Amino acid sequence: MIVRKYKARNMHEAILKIRRELGKDAVIISQRKIRKGGLLGLFSQKIFEVTVTADNSDTRDINDYDTTESIEAFKKAVKHKTHDLERINNEDIIKEVKDMRNMLNNVMQNSIGIGKSKLQLKLENSDLNTSVINNIMREMSTITGDLEDREKLRLVVQNMIRVDHRKLDKTVVLVGPTGVGKTTTIAKLAGKMALVENKKVGLITIDTYRIGAVEQLRTYADIINIPFKVVLNVKDMEKAIESMEDCDVILVDTTGRSSKNKMQISELRTFINKLNTDNIHLVISCTTKNSDIDVIVNGYKQLNYNNVIITKLDETCTYGSILNIENSSSKPISFVTTGQNVPEDIKCMDSDELTKLVLGEDIIC
Ligand SMILES: Nc1nc2c(ncn2[C@@H]2O[C@H](COP(=O)(O)OP(=O)(O)OP(=O)(O)O)[C@@H](O)[C@H]2O)c(=O)[nH]1
Ligand SMILES: [Mg+2]
């Protein structure tokens, strides 16, 4: 609050001055006439003294200024208003962007589940890949009749898992990536057939690549007491097969190869072609990453394998890979292996048992 005195020749002049300086809201507190100038009271001039009060001179509206002042005041006011406006706008925009970002985050977080049924999420949790889940959902939608989803799912999965439990005879070859359990599985099969089924079994290995590979299989052959041959080239292969003519089953172990190495797989094919057999099993571990399953299954296709053997079921708690392998290879499952013990940890599971594993209703310990 300010209080000022103004002197003018008349009230009109005083009011103009006051309005110019203090704006239109200035309040006149008092006014009086006084004398100014002159000598000893002679020739003095009568003037008005006006006392006014106002809140603040800066509170003037731009209309209250005279022309020059008004332009300056206008510019100042516009500048202030623009700044205020910008500030408000920026704050609004920032708030708006923040809100949108939060909304987007929520949508993205929830989108994992958006549009997906409980069933789809359950299948994803079993490590089934997207294309298999889509196949399942499509097949389920074609089932008519008054069945619950659970029953439809079981039917579809059971139908998708094909098994082949024909008895092994003649020449049987196991192929597959390194370390999946080919040699151990051969030892299990040899042990079961020789000791339990009383079959005449012969063992051949063409795995001379890895140090110790030959000794590993020779040890099993010695324990089970069955003939064993090491094959170094295609010619040796023919001789080895001839020497085991009287065997009911000849089990052939091969070197573990990366499915990405086409040269190595072709080399293997030269040996396998000589065997002239339709008993070729691709061995693949249940713990294989989904993205690698297709690579392995397709990489080995040039060997024309007829079946798949899925190993290491004891090493996982979700069994979606069984169906992923089955779906990718389109070959029936002949055996699954469930541990390192020779010969007991090998099974011929039927599609019902495998379905239970895939759907998480059973577990291998
Ligand atoms: N947990 C578990 N381990 C297994 C199973 N089958 C094999 N193994 C183990 O896996 C490892 C590799 O087994 P091998 O039989 O040598 O595998 P391979 O495919 O012959 O390996 P390469 O000849 O090097 O290609 C060994 O330690 C086995 O005991 C199984 O069903 N479960
Ligand atoms: Mg081996």
Image (cartoon, rainbow, N blue to C red):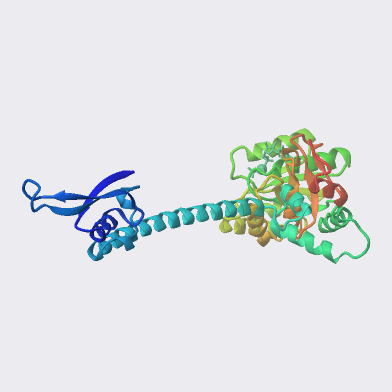
- 176 or 339: nearer the viewer: 339
Residue lying at 28% horizontally and 61% vertically, measured from the top left: 65
The quadrant of the image that shows the N terminus is: top left
Residue 227 left/right relative to 148: left
- Tell me: residue 14, above or below residue 286: below
- 363 or 195: nearer the viewer: 363
Q: How many marks?
A: 0
Residue 57 left/right relative to 163: left
Q: Position of residue 241 (x, y in %)?
A: 74, 52
For ligand 2, give the image quadrant: top right
Residue 283 left/right relative to 33: right
Residue 68 left/right relative to 93: left
Q: Is residue 361 visible?
A: yes
- Tell me: residue 182, above or below residue 68: above
Q: Quadrant of the rendered structure where residue 80 is?
A: bottom left
- 28 or 46: nearer the viewer: 46
Q: Position of residue 160 (x, y in %)?
A: 81, 58
Q: Is residue 233 visible?
A: no
Residue lying at 59% horizontally and 39% vertically, measured from the top left: 211
- Residue at the far left: name it: 39
Q: Position of residue 130 (x, y in %)?
A: 70, 57
Q: Position of residue 36 (x, y in %)?
A: 13, 50
Residue lying at 67% horizontally and 47% vertically, measured from the top left: 288
The quadrant of the image that shows the C terminus is: top right
- 268 or 203: nearer the viewer: 268
